[in-house]
Image (cartoon, grey):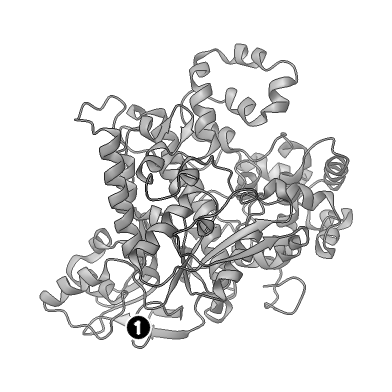
Amino acid sequence: MTEIMVHRGPDSHGYYTAPGIGFGVRRLSIIDLETGDQPISNEDGTVTVVCNGEIYNFPELRQELLSAGHRFRTRSDVEVIVHLYEDYGVECLHRLRGMFGFALWDTRRRRLMLARDRLGIKPVHYAVEQDGCYFASEMKSILIGDQVERQLDVRALQDLFTFGFALGPRTFFTRIRRLQPGHYLLYHDGVASTHKYWDVTFPEKNDRSPHLGAGEWAESLLEKLRESVRIHLRSDVPAGAWLSAGIDSSSVARLMSESTERPVQTFTLAFEDLNFDEVHGQNTLDAYPGYDLPNSREICTGKDLALLPKALWHCEDHSTTGLEIPHLILSESASRRVKVVLTGEGSDEMFGGYRWFQVDKLLRPLAWVPLSLRRLMLLGPLIPKLWPGASRAHLAPRQMNLLRYAKLIAPLQVNVRQRFFSPDLEQEIAITRDQEPVLVLPDGFQNWHPFCQLQYYEIKIRLPDYIVHHLDRMSMAHSLEVRVPFLDHELVEFCARIPPRLKMRGLKEKYILRKAMRGVLPKEIVQRRKRGLRAPVDSWFENDLPEFAVDLLLKERLREKGYFSPDFVAHMLREHRAGAKFFAAPLLGVLVTQLWDELFMKGCRPNADSATLRL
């Protein structure tokens, strides 16, 4: 189980076994390089932990625990967990500031505790079977034990062609679940229970508390962001930064350079297809005078679809965007120079930077119009063709719920879901159609501003299940630790209190962040519109496909696996290549599902030399 994810920790390994429990860990050494190996136990060995991630406030916690009489064997950040647990039990989670997935064994209670950080930056998977609870950072470690049945969760496949990814807690395997962000699991006497320990909340829409001015909010935001970057730099190895042309990564890189004496090595991704290249025609921060940011640049080309088997092997739960491949390329580049990078991910969730925040704001007033009249407004080809995303949102329910959210972010430009599943799979889907996941909304949700309601869905669904999921998997594929200062939970709680009118002024996204960074970043970057990172999926399917993709999209191979209609898949490919319709997203969904079956549903051991890694 540990060997199959050696990429997550190539520096050392460790094991702990006792009656009823077995722990294994692979370590990527970032803090306390000499004495920080895991598992780590408390003074009398009654509490043992293995942890993936970083506890950024460990120096403060360590000093507090030393003052309380605890003895430390290491200088590791992970050791504070066992001593905090001694004093606070499961409530220790409220004291931790960082990204983590950990497993803790309490010998006295004979109880297992699994925990995941508040924003889901680090993964935890588990499967509860009759003979015990299996858990790991990656599903392949659970599968390799051959104690858990491999069966496709058809609801996850529905999610793939609705949202573009699977919604937690489910995975593409029926028996394996993700521990949700801000949750912990207790397993005792054969019974597992999950519990929430954190959630983000927003002020009521008509909040009467005293309001700060825009300048005061901006000043406080800059101070909080500086603090977050500073603690995210706690490391015994040098840290670099991923750098795009946008304000998010530029802010992080600039604040890093303010907090460290050595130049910050930065890494930028460009695209051969200029239609997808967000840095084309725009200077990144390293190009401006006065910023000491040495930069390495990698280019994603049309041939890089060949990396999909490797990307999917590490990603496990796939998507329809193809962004795994650019992230894999950027991670491989950064790993040649550093072990740690900081990135700007999370800013769009905190400040409403995605285009659907603008769409929702524009169309929400029309949501009061009866649905029949809204349908009439879309008659004719103009709006559906020029702005298909807005057309979907225009017909969405007025209240913020999962259906409205799906229509706002839906990756598919045409409704093909009911036409290309195989008859057998369609029958299975029909049986499970009423078992949609329910996001448990906090008290007072209906009194929040609509902008905040959409933010909550972003933070609870797309952020953990897609954004940081792929960020963690593609970086750890190359033993690279990615840190996200915008997702420090104290910063997240602060940003939740900022009024929506300051997050989006008119249709200008991230207004308050831009105001905070004036004078810190060049004016051009502060004012620059968001382009966003996209993979060239359209052109990938317009050109010659790699051999593995050609094979998996053959009619006989589609018929063999039984998920999709071979005739309709062939139709989509023809239409896409003819330029009649753009079927890139559903075609990629078909390909990754076929490939997922090839990699994970077989009983093979992994073979790094083969064209497609297999489990």
Position of residue 395 in the picture relative to residue 587 (left or right): left
**Secondary element at image label 1:** loop
Crowding around mark 1 (Cα neighbors within 10 Å: few <14, some 14 to 19, many 20+) is many
Q: Quadrant of the N terminus?
A: bottom right
The residue lying at 80 percent from left, 50 percent from top is 541
Q: Name the residue under label 1.
A: 36
| Residue type, label 1 | Gly
Measuring from the top left, give residue 565's x and y in whole percent. Answer: 82, 45
Give the answer, above or below, for where 505 lies relative to 83. above
Check the image and report above or below for 1 versus 295.
Answer: below
Which residue reaches farthest front? 289
Residue at 52%, 48% (x, y): give it.
246
Answer with the quarter of the image where residue 395 lies: top right
Relative to 380, 576 lies left or right: right
Q: Is residue 411 toward the left or the right of residue 241 in the image?
A: right
Q: Residue at x 34, y 38 (%)?
A: 442
Residue at x-position 64% and y-position 44%: 158
The vertical placement of 155 against 376, above or below, is below
